[in-house]
Image: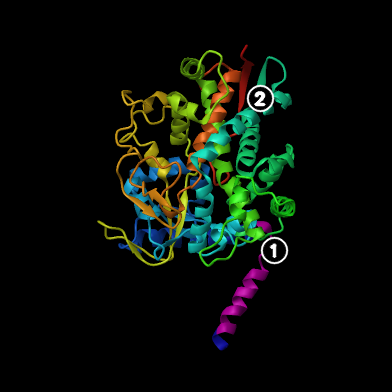
């Protein structure tokens, strides 16, 4: 105690003398300088040769959080040029190892359960939004069963019924939406596309009963749920913040509507429905237990929310890209006239296959505007990266950025150019190595049916591995149908007549257009 008192006395005396803000500022600056100095020294002198190089940063904890958050794709590409495909950066105090390229995608997205885990990363975000006992709030084996329940319901017959529903929702929306009154005007299109994707998905997947219980407030409720996916909620998901209170209210409100509808169906003895709710009501786990009502409600929320971000973002980017390229929009219109007839009969599921350019604008938009820029996995056991000396410890998080390979000139000539025609085989911009999933390639069953491993492809808009999106076929049908109907109704161009497109907003976990993103619209005769 004697030594401690000897130190404490002078320190206390010195601190008591700091009576002015300038003196306090000098001490604070000195402490900051010391912390920065030690941090830089550690990076230079104490690098672990068995771990990937660390992106240089001045401040501990903060690390590269700000530069990464401002523009993740640019951050990945700049550091790839400095360090190669494998590097580590500090994200909110956590060592995050990025592995770029097709090999990196495969290493992370097809990692074994004993090595990597999505649940440990995402449950703090998804459980408050989706609800308990589903997705990442349950064992992986149960999640695979839940995915199987939903995938079984996404049949060709279901898609055939969805196209007329989606078409009707789109045309009805534009008839009643005040933003599209008159013959022409200017509109902030992302807001409208968010509502359209919610309405079309809800009516298709949830059925007429659920859809009829919502007006435009449906989009507002799902927007409140969506706010639960902000990056802040990795740490503050529990906090009584305004957006978290709205998130929780929306989750309870929507879940109650679903559970009330379940009870109404049973009371009425209804047995002829073929929507997703009906399939889940009749599903049983491998142990023989029926799916509880609260799990059905939470799975229905998850089903819509899991696709809403990407579909809303992608449909907005599609419209903004068409406004920047009116020539492509006219080519899409001519394609329908030539393939389906000048009278443009009501769209059917089979018609979508006759519209290759319409399919291509979805592919090209997903390529250049990857909805999810970062896919993370917790490391559960030390992982040796094949062909390198690196071993990734359990203190790291792994990050896959498949959008980087989708804009890599090694695979896509002139990669930053939005050009739907590149998906034609005879195009000079045709992708060089993108595999066609109808070809013979390795498939695997994680518990919800055979799927392509697919992670060796540079084009992975729907992910890969056990967590690959089961709704990719629905998303394609939905986006193609929305695009085809809008092309029938409107001509778009940029307000200033240019070919520019707005910048990307990376404030959330999903890549969206910065709003307002206005376009000029004109109704077709």
Quarter occupied by residue 510 = top right
Residue 46 spot, x, y in % from top left: 35, 64
Of residues 303 and 259, the one nearer the viewer is 259
User: Does residue 503 appear anywhere in the picture?
Assistant: no
> In front: 327, or 475?
475
Pointer 1 residue: 19
Left/right placement of residue 521 relative to residue 377 reads right
Q: Is residue 519 magenta?
A: no
Residue 449, how many percent across, how many down?
43, 52
Would residue 17 be counted in the magenta stretch? yes
- Look at the image and name its color scheme: rainbow
Q: Is residue 170 above or below residue 371?
A: above
Image quarter of the C terminus:
top right
Front of the two marks 1 and 2? 2
Any part of residue 386 in sight: yes
Mark 1 and mark 2: Cα distance apart in space? 57 Å
440 left or right of 445 in image: left
Picture quadrant of residue 386: bottom left
Which residue shows up at 48% across the image and 63% down it? 141
In this view, the residue farthest toward the left is: 387
- The mark that comes first in sequence, 1 or 2, is 1
Residue 451 in percent (x, y) is at 40, 49
Neighbourhood count class around disc 2 (C-alpha, 10 Å): few under 14, some 14–19, many 20 upward: some
The single residue placed furthest to the top in the displayed view is 525
Neighbours of disc 1 within 10 Å: few (<14), some (14-19), many (20+)? few
Please state the horizontal and vertical placement of residue 464, each as a whole percent of the image: 41, 49
Q: Main secondary structure of the magenta part?
A: helix
Q: Is residue 115 above or below residue 64?
A: below
Mark 2 element type: strand
Residue behind mark 2: 187
Magenta-tinted stretch: 4-23
């Amino acid at each position: 105690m004697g030594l401690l008192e000897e130190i404490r006395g002078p320190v206390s005396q010195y601190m008591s003398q700091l009576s002015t803000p300038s003196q306090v500022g000098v001490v604070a600056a000195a402490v900051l300088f010391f912390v920065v100095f030690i941090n830089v020294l550690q990076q230079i002198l104490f690098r672990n040769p068995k771990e990937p190089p660390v992106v240089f940063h001045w401040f501990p904890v903060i690390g590269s959080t700000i530069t990464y958050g401002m523009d993740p794709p640019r951050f990945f590409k700049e550091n790839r040029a400095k360090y190669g495909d494998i590097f580590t950066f500090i994200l909110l105090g956590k060592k995050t190892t990025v592995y770029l390229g097709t090999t990196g995608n495969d290493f992370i997205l097809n990692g074994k359960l004993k090595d990597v885990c999505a649940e440990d990363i995402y449950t703090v975000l998804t459980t408050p939004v989706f609800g308990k006992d589903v997705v990442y709030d349950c064992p992986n084996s149960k999640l695979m069963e839940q995915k199987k329940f939903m995938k079984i319901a996404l049949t060709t017959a279901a898609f055939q019924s969805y196209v007329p529903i989606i078409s009707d929702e789109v045309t009805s929306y534009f008839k009643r939406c005040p933003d599209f009154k008159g013959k022409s005007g200017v509109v902030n299109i992302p807001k409208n596309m968010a509502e359209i994707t919610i309405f079309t998905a809800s009516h298709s997947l949830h059925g007429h009963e659920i859809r009829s219980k919502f007006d435009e407030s449906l989009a507002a409720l799902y927007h409140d749920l969506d706010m639960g996916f902000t990056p802040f909620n990795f740490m503050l998901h529990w906090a009584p913040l305004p957006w978290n209170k709205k998130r929780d209210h929306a989750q309870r409100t929507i879940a109650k509507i679903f559970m009330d509808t379940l009870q109404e169906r049973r009371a009425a003895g209804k047995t002829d429905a073929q929507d997703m709710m009906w399939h889940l009501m009749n599903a049983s786990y491998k142990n023989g237990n029926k799916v509880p009502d609260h799990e059905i409600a939470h799975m229905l929320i998850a089903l819509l929310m899991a696709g809403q971000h990407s579909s809303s973002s992608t449909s907005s980017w599609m419209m903004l890209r068409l406004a920047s390229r009116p020539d492509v929009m006219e080519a899409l219109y001519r394609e329908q006239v030539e393939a389906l007839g000048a009278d443009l009969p009501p769209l059917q599921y089979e018609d979508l296959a006759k519209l290759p350019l319409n399919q291509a604008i979805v592919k090209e938009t997903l390529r250049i505007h990857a909805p999810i820029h970062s896919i993370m996995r917790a490391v559960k056991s030390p992982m040796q990266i094949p062909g390198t000396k690196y071993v990734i410890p359990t203190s790291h998080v792994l990050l896959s950025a498949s959008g980087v390979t989708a804009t890599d000139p090694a695979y896509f000539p002139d990669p930053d150019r939005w050009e739907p025609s590149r998906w034609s085989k005879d195009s000079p911009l045709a992708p060089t190595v993108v595999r066609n999933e109808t070809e013979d390639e390795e498939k695997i069953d994680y518990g919800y049916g055979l799927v392509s491993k697919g992670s060796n492809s540079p084009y992975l808009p729907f992910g890969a591995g056990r967590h690959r999106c089961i709704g990719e076929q629905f998303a394609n049908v939905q986006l193609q149908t929305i695009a085809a109907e809008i092309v029938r109704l409107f001509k778009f161009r940029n307000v200033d007549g240019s070919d520019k497109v707005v910048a990307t907003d990376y404030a959330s976990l999903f890549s969206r257009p910065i709003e307002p993103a206005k376009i000029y619209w004109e109704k077709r005769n």
